[in-house]
Image (tube, rainbow, N blue to C red):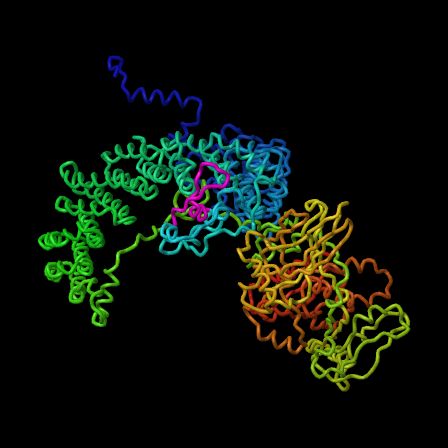
């Protein structure tokens, strides 16, 4: 080229390369080590230092190890040049983990740079310091991140958000709360760039801490359109997960379509379980495959593996979503704003953003709004090949669950010549799902071109798609069958157009599709089988011949034509048996036995001779499978006299030979069309798992609906071991809980432990205040002290008198024997200080009487006046045990009219959706029976209707309910003035037990029988007593500290759990203010199974400080025990107002 000027293509290429490299540092990559780097690093000039550092980075990019320059580079971190500092940071970031000791030398410089006026320097310092990833500097990095999170520069705050996942990867459990707090602070940022980085950090650090999202949910939704594209993807997923965890699924959405649509079970539906098509009630034109939609929603919530058995069939016992945790997109503002803010993102330039936004509308939007995602997804099909494949993988799921969604746009899924094979197969599968009676003719015309495609594998896939269309649309089954039959005959006769291998793949698929269609209605397709049998001689694919032979044996008795052809066909099989492939030989042997079992009497003798000849040939075959099957089936031949003979013979005992019965069972009856294996696996839209069809690392399904109780608690719904605090009333309504007033007389039982010590009914001394001491009258009436020391049960006579000053002496808390033991002052013994440590500890028993009168169960709000049009409904759990069934929990429900107009016909009833046609009869029968199985107990015992409720009037009712689980709420219908309102009763696990009276010895014995896995312990901090101690300035009240704390603990336990107070034991200590060792024992019995549940509280600390309470539960029902333990820890740690 242009040789007359001495120019070539190579010279022009070099020249253009030189031109493009002018003014760049690309020359450093040509020979980066051509000069001495070390002198340049020690130079006085910043330009030379930059040159050296650039050469080092060029060597690093080419894979060279330049860590030997680390000391010389580190000293330049203090340079005042921004360019030098940036290059040093890049170098340190690469080698800090390899040279940690030297990297620590630059920490002081990093900390100084955090105060640099240039925000870029502050950001670089944070990025480098967080990238070092050494545990020794993790606390310093945490402080730096916290400081930069409050930086006035947006870029610095964004770098702080990016540094949080790096800090979290160091597994600093002690700093987890601080890291999450910083992430929550950054989520509140006003800059969309910071919010996007903070969302990515949140997803990496604490994806299930929805309390951080709940505080900023609306503002995050409003900021979503302004966040950078990749931050939008993460933030969309976070907001979707929060909305489901907070409010549940949307009842108008596709996820609950199977619950909303009626299911009519019949034999026909049972035979085709995967083709259940339902239409919505609003008259719209789209159809929904309810079973696939149900499995899709379950897979999104729990993962597909849980709902697919090992054989790939649907686990039908688990179908049907629980509708107890749903919301409405029309009334829920949080769902509305999420859908509104993601709607513009459907037209984003980023394909991943469009998929994420489409996923939100697919899961949360009402069914009539789902078509909004169709055109944006179809627009993505015009993008790159890789993006097109990802989009088609998601459209495939949408089309399976909602076929009519893409039915009008079937032409967009026609194959293009530039499509890869993977995209072609996806489009074919989508076409088979969305084909309708109006579009099937156009689709078949397109398929005719695909079948002639040179890629025979693609042609075979097209044939399989035709078979799927015939199954979905029975009206076109005959048309499909005719076309497939013509294709089978032409493929089998035209051997020169393709090689044998290419012919097989199409022909086998054609026969397989024909076989599937014939299975649906064999009687009407006899002539098709005859045509296939006549073309056997030209059919050379062993798999295709084997399937045709299977159809001949299976349907040999469905008509007159096949039965006439059978003897001739089997003679043909006998002549060609030695030339057939192994799979064809096996089918010939099987078909022979099937034909003999169904043959007519006049054809039996001829067929027996032919089949016997075939079996003799098979016994000498080279393949051992053929030989073994022939030997087994030869024994059947002597018994195969025809099924028709059974009708003629009166005495059928001669046919009851085991061999004949076995032959009849295996080959006698025609096989019914089996349920198609359900092998689809559905994952969240836009996720990597949906592309690779298995759970990719980091994949998490959607959270449990309504698993967040209260955002203000600031606690994650997950607890250690069991979700014990997900739906507990103490967290849901503690802020609104009010005092429920005094209890009924029947509920004020005596929680006294007096006399529980065996053999001590009259042998235990007690503390009684003097009759004229008015100051301590209340304490004396509630608390009595007795000697409970385990070292001595002997009665020590003597009385204790109060001092004139009103102070209680320490000796009043123990008997004389116990006091002598503690002081080690036994007569005749030497006072050796070392012996004091071996003294056995003594205890003083405190008996609390009539405390039941002070127990006030907590009140919860069922319906507030704002939502109930003036009607307020409160409820509290009662300690009363139901006389109808032990599975029922008693509640005291209070109805109050806060309006100015009277109300009528107030009734609390069972949810209508759960009632069967005779639910009222069941409720009445359950109320009449005193016991029965769980399924016979009504959810709600019918309540007496309140006819009229005047303004300001309050009426109480006792309600007995049966909760499905001690953690799941119960949905009820509240009727008032003829209008219905749905309410939720949240269970309190503390009232799923009843008091179990026992003494200390019985308690200790039962506790020793429940060790190990039946015992669980947690600790909490108790602070209710501090506020009361602070108001006591008079020293005369010191004596009440122990008593007041015991009373506070006992009252809090008995007000939140239906337990029996067994004993209160106080350890004898030298310090009057020491409460360590104070032990309270409670006992109860689970209502449903009468298993004992033992609770032990042990205190540690002093009266004037927060007390550490160790809560121990011994219970055979370990899950119930863990949940009860979490409940007790929660209300003990919560301070009473």
Give residue 838's position: percent from left, percent from top: 68, 78
In the rendered image, the residue lying farthest to the left is 575
Give residue 751's position: percent from left, percent from top: 73, 71
Q: Report if residue 1127 is visible in the image.
A: yes
Quarter occupied by the N terminus = top left
Give residue 189's position: percent from left, percent from top: 62, 36
Quadrant of the rendered image containing residue 1136: bottom right
At x 18% / y 39%, what residue is drawn? 491
- 1070 shown above or below 382: below
Total residue callouts = 0
Q: Nearer the viewer, residue 952 or 25?
A: 952
Residue 289 counted in the magenta span: yes
Residue 926 counted in the magenta span: no
Q: Is residue 126 left or right of residue 780?
A: left
Give residue 842's position: percent from left, percent from top: 72, 76
Q: Report if residue 726 is visible in the image.
A: no
Q: Nearer the viewer, residue 854 or 1064?
A: 854
At x 74% / y 49%, what residue is drawn? 897
At x 63% / y 36%, what residue is drawn? 151
- 209 shown above or below 1004: above
In the rendered image, the residue lying farthest to the top is 4
Q: Nearer the viewer, residue 474 or 111?
A: 474
Quarter occupied by the C terminus = bottom right
Quadrant of the rendered image containing residue 21: top left
Q: Is residue 64 left or right of residue 363?
A: left
Start-end of magenta stretch: 273-296
């Amino acid at each position: 080229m242009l040789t007359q000027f001495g120019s070539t293509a190579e010279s022009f290429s070099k020249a253009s390369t030189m031109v493009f490299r002018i003014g760049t540092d690309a020359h450093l990559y040509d020979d980066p080590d051509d000069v001495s780097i070390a002198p340049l690093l020690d130079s006085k000039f910043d330009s030379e230092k930059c040159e050296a550092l650039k050469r080092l980075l060029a060597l690093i990019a080419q894979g060279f190890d330049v860590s030997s320059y680390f000391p010389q580079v580190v000293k330049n971190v203090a340079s005042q040049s921004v360019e030098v500092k940036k290059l040093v940071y890049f170098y340190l970031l690469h080698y800090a983990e390899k040279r940690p000791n030297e990297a620590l030398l630059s920490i002081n410089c990093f900390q100084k740079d955090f105060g640099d006026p240039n925000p870029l320097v502050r950001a670089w310092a944070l990025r480098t310091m967080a990238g070092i990833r050494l545990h020794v500097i993790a606390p310093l990095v945490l402080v730096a991140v916290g400081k930069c999170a409050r930086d006035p520069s947006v870029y610095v705050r964004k770098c702080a958000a990016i540094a949080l996942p790096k800090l979290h990867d160091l597994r600093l459990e002690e700093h987890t709360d601080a890291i999450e707090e910083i992430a929550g602070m950054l989520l509140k940022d006003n800059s969309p760039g910071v919010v996007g980085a903070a969302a990515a950090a949140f997803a990496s650090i604490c994806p299930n801490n929805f309390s951080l999202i709940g505080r900023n949910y609306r503002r995050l939704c409003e900021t979503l359109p302004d966040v950078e594209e990749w931050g939008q993807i993460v933030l969309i997923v976070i907001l979707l997960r929060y909305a489901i965890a907070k409010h549940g699924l949307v009842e108008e959405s596709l996820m609950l379509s199977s619950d909303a649509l009626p299911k009519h079970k019949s034999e026909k539906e049972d035979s085709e379980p995967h083709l259940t098509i339902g239409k919505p009630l609003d008259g719209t034109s789209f159809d929904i495959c309810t079973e696939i939609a149900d499995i899709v929603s379950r897979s999104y919530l729990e993962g597909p593996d849980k709902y697919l058995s090992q054989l790939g069939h649907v686990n039908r016992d688990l179908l049907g979503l629980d509708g107890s945790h749903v919301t409405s997109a029309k009334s829920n503002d949080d769902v509305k704003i999420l859908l509104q803010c993601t709607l513009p993102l459907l037209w984003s330039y980023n394909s991943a953003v469009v998929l994420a936004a489409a996923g939100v509308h697919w899961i949360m939007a009402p069914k009539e709004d789902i078509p909004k995602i169709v055109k944006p997804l179809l627009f993505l099909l015009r993008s790159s090949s890789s993006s097109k494949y990802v989009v088609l993988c998601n459209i495939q799921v949408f089309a399976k669950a909602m076929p009519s969604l893409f039915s009008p746009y079937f032409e967009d899924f026609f194959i293009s010549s530039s499509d890869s094979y993977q995209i072609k197969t996806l489009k074919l599968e989508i076409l088979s799902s969305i084909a309708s009676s109006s579009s099937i003719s156009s689709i078949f015309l397109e398929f005719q071109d695909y079948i002639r495609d040179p890629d025979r594998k693609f042609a075979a896939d097209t044939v399989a798609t035709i078979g799927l269309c015939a199954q979905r649309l029975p009206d076109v089954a005959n048309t499909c069958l005719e076309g497939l039959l013509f294709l089978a005959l032409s493929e089998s006769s035209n051997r020169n157009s393709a090689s044998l291998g290419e012919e097989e793949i199409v022909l086998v698929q054609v026969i397989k599709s024909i076989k599937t269609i014939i299975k649906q209605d064999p009687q009407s397709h006899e002539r098709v089988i005859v045509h296939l049998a006549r073309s056997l001689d030209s059919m050379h694919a062993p798999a295709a011949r084997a399937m045709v032979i299977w159809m001949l044996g299976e349907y040999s008795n469905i008509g007159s034509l096949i039965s006439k052809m059978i003897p001739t066909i089997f003679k043909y099989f006998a002549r060609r048996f030695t030339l057939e492939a192994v799979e064809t030989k096996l089918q010939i042997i099987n078909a022979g036995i099937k034909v003999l079992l169904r043959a007519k009497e006049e054809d039996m003798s001829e067929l027996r001779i032919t089949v016997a000849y075939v079996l003799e040939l098979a016994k000498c075959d080279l393949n051992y499978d053929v030989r073994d099957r022939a030997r087994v089936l030869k024994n059947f031949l002597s018994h195969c006299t025809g099924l028709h003979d059974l009708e003629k013979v009166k005495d059928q005992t001669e046919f009851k030979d085991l061999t004949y019965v076995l032959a009849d069972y295996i080959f006698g009856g025609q096989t019914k069309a089996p349920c198609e294996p359900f092998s689809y696996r559905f994952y969240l839209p836009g996720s990597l798992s949906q592309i690779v069809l298995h759970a990719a690392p980091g994949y998490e399904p959607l959270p449990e609906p309504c698993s967040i109780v209260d955002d203000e608690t600031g606690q994650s719904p997950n607890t250690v071991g069991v979700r014990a605090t997900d739906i507990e009333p103490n967290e849901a309504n503690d802020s609104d809980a009010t005092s429920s007033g005094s209890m009924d007389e029947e509920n004020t039982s005596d929680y006294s432990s007096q006399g529980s010590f065996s053999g001590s009914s009259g042998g235990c001394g007690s503390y009684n205040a003097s009759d004229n001491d008015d100051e301590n009258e209340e304490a004396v009436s509630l608390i009595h002290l007795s000697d409970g020391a385990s070292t001595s049960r002997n009665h020590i006579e003597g009385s204790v008198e109060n001092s004139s000053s009103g102070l209680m002496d320490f000796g009043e808390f123990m008997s004389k024997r116990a006091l002598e033991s503690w002081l080690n002052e036994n007569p005749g013994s030497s006072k050796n200080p070392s012996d004091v440590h071996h003294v056995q500890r003594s205890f003083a028993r405190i008996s609390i009487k009539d405390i039941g009168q002070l127990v006030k169960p907590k009140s919860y709000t069922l319906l507030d006046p704002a939502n109930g049009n003036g009607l307020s409904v409160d409820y509290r759990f009662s300690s009363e045990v139901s006389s109808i069934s032990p599975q029922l929990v008693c509640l005291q429900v209070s109805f109050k009219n806060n309006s100015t107009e009277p109300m009528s016909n107030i009734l609390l009833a069972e949810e209508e959706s759960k009632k069967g046609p005779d639910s009222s009869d069941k409720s009445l029968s359950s109320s009449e029976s005193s016991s029965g199985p769980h399924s016979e107990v009504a959810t709600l015992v019918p309540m007496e209707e309140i006819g009229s409720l005047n303004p300001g009037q309050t009426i109480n009712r006792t309600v007995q309910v049966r909760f499905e689980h001690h953690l799941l709420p119960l949905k009820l219908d509240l009727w008032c003035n003829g209008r219905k309102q749905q309410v939720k009763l949240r269970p309190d696990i503390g009232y799923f037990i009843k008091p179990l009276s026992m003494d200390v010895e019985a308690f200790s014995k039962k506790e020793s029988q429940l060790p190990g896995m039946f015992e669980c312990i947690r600790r909490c901090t108790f602070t209710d007593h501090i506020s009361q101690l602070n108001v006591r300035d008079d020293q005369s009240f010191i004596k009440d500290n122990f008593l007041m704390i015991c009373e506070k603990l006992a009252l809090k336990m008995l007000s939140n759990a239906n337990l029996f107070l067994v004993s209160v034991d106080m350890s004898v200590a030298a310090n009057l203010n020491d409460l360590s060792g104070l032990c309270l024992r409670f006992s109860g019995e689970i209502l449903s199974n009468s298993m004992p549940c033992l609770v032990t509280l042990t205190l540690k600390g002093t009266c004037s400080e927060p007390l550490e309470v160790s809560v121990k539960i011994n219970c055979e029902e370990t899950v119930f025990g863990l949940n009860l333990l979490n409940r007790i820890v929660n209300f003990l740690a919560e301070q009473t107002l």
